[in-house]
Image: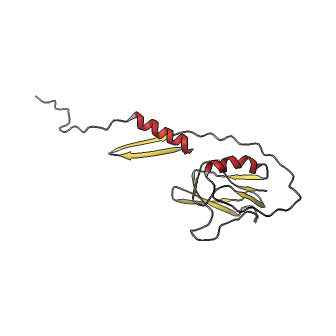
């Protein structure tokens, strides 16, 4: 005799592979991402980590009197940009990303960049765009000044609080 409350054709739910979850967590750690999601055969796994960003104290340094030619901006990998951030912050104020997304230096592919190293910007001027969830978010200059350094490359993924541009 069959159980009347049991489903006629039971569906087997896929089990979660702990090794896969650990591997995804390692990928987060190694790449510096804040979350990763994988879906396969009806099983969806999302692994996320909480990031805390401490505000660095602002230090003001007198501008050098000698005028030097600005260095060209080269595409740098994310770890190099993070290592350069403390040195760059000593020369000016870093404009940080208010969100996780992808940074774009120009309004559209093939167009001129919003800013270049050495440009003078005014408060509120668009420096770059951070795309998050298919929404383009303009990142504006918090103050007027000179662009000392651009710390991200075009179409580079950025994290919340990551320095993007240094303005002196």
Residue drawn at point x = 67 percent, y = 66 percent: 114
The answer to whether residue 33 is above or below residue 142 is above
Quadrant the N terminus occupies: top left
Q: Position of residue 47 (x, y in %)?
A: 47, 40
Q: Is residue 140 left or right of residue 109?
A: right
Residue drawn at point x = 68 percent, y = 46 percent: 83
Which one is in front, 67 or 50? 67
Q: Position of residue 4 (x, y in %)?
A: 16, 32
Snapshot colouring:
secondary structure
| Residue, far top | 1
Residue drawn at point x = 48 percent, y = 45 percent: 36
| Residue, far right | 65
| Residue, far left | 1
Q: Position of residue 161 (x, y in %)?
A: 65, 47
Work out whether residue 4 can be spotted: yes
Q: Position of residue 168 (x, y in %)?
A: 79, 56
Q: Is residue 136 left or right of residue 14?
A: right
Work out whether residue 162 can be spotted: no
The answer to whether residue 9 is above or below residue 100 is above
Q: Is residue 12 left or right of residue 149?
A: left
Total count of labels: 0
């Amino acid at each position: 005799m069959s159980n009347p409350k049991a489903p006629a054709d039971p569906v087997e739910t896929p089990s979660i592979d702990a090794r896969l979850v650990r591997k995804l967590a390692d990928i987060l750690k190694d790449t510096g991402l804040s979350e990763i999601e994988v879906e396969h055969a009806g099983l969806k796994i999302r692994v996320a980590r909480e990031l805390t960003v401490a505000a660095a104290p602002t230090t003001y340094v007198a501008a050098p009197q000698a005028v030097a030619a600005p260095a060209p901006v080269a595409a740098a990998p994310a770890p190099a940009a993070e290592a350069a951030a403390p040195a760059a912050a000593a020369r000016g104020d870093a404009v940080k990303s208010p969100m996780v997304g992808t940074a774009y230096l120009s309004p559209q592919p093939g167009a001129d960049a919003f800013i270049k190293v050495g440009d003078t910007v005014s408060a509120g001027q668009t420096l770059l765009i951070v795309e998050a969830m298919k929404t383009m978010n303009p990142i504006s200059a918090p103050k007027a000044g000179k662009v000392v350094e651009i710390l991200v490359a075009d179409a580079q993924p950025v994290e919340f609080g990551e320095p993007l541009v240094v303005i002196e």
